[in-house]
Image (spheres, rainbow, N blue to C red):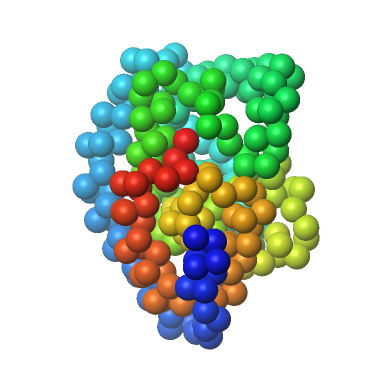
């Protein structure tokens, strides 16, 4: 899947017109999807409040275009003591620690809110509030995954530079090629291939493949 995704990202020239069209697609797509998704986001937020103490939404600073930080939004899927639970697991379970270091995620994650947290992760419903980030121009519908600062701080400078030339995306090659079944190295290869081979046709191809990837739930943990 990774090699096929890279082949899709054939190198093409970028123009200001293409970038303008991409932004128009972002705005129209985000508005349309937000209107449709608003009831779903509301229900998920209410269920989170019932199932777990704490806020319904999660916000975290992530690096965006040009390395500028922005607050990325999600419906909260983790317990309020998620950081403590992760530290305890890393200290007690060597296999889980290796999985975390390689993939940046855990197939069996003790931090998730029972029931609703895992359901939202499996269906990607927790990501829907990022449509607001798209409308605000902090993200795009398609782009590299917006990684947390602790991960980005440990990446080679050249990889960081490439990633910062575009807005991070709600979906991308990583999401349609296997998601969390791929390790961090594969994610970075796909993101770099996307940036260097970007075109409107590639964006449309990724958008068309995203619903199937969500339905299949491959790598969604």
Q: Is residue 147 above or below residue 174?
A: above
Residue 18 pos. (x, y %): 43, 80
- Residue at (78, 60) in percent of width and height: 157
Total marks in image: 0
Q: Is residue 82 above or below residue 215?
A: above
* Quadrant hosting residue 64: bottom right
Q: Is residue 174 left or right of residue 46?
A: right
Residue 210 visible to an observer of this rendering: yes
- Residue at (55, 81) in percent of width and height: 11
Residue 135 pos. (x, y %): 39, 56
* Quadrant hosting residue 50: top left
Residue 5 pos. (x, y %): 50, 66
- Residue at (36, 30) in percent of width and height: 119
Which sits in the foreground, 87 or 96? Answer: 96
Q: Is residue 35 above or below residue 110?
A: below
Residue 106 pos. (x, y %): 57, 32
* Quadrant hosting residue 163: bottom right
Q: Is residue 215 above or below residue 22?
A: above
Residue 129 visible to an observer of this rendering: no
- Residue at (43, 73) in percent of width and height: 202
């Amino acid at each position: 899947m990774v090699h096929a995704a890279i082949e899709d990202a054939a190198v093409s020239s970028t123009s200001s017109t293409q970038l303008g069209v991409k932004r128009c697609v972002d705005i129209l797509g985000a508005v349309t999807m937000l209107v449709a998704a608003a009831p779903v986001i509301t229900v998920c937020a209410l269920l989170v409040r019932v199932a777990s103490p704490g806020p319904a939404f999660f916000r975290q600073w992530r690096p965006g275009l040009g390395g500028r930080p922005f607050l990325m939004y999600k419906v909260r899927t983790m317990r309020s003591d998620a950081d403590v639970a992760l530290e305890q697991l890393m200290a007690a379970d060597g296999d889980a620690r290796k999985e975390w270091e390689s993939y940046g995620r855990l197939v069996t994650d003790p931090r998730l809110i029972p029931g609703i947290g895992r359901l939202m992760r499996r269906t990607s419903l927790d990501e829907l509030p990022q449509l607001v980030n798209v409308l605000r121009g902090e993200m795009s519908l398609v782009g590299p995954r917006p990684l947390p600062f602790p991960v980005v701080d440990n990446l080679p400078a050249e990889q960081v530079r490439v990633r910062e030339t575009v807005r991070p995306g709600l979906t991308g090659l990583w999401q349609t090629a296997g998601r969390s079944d791929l390790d961090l190295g594969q994610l970075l290869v796909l993101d770099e291939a996307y940036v260097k081979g970007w075109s409107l046709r590639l964006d449309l191809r990724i958008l068309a493949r995203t619903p199937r990837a969500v339905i299949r739930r491959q790598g969604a943990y």
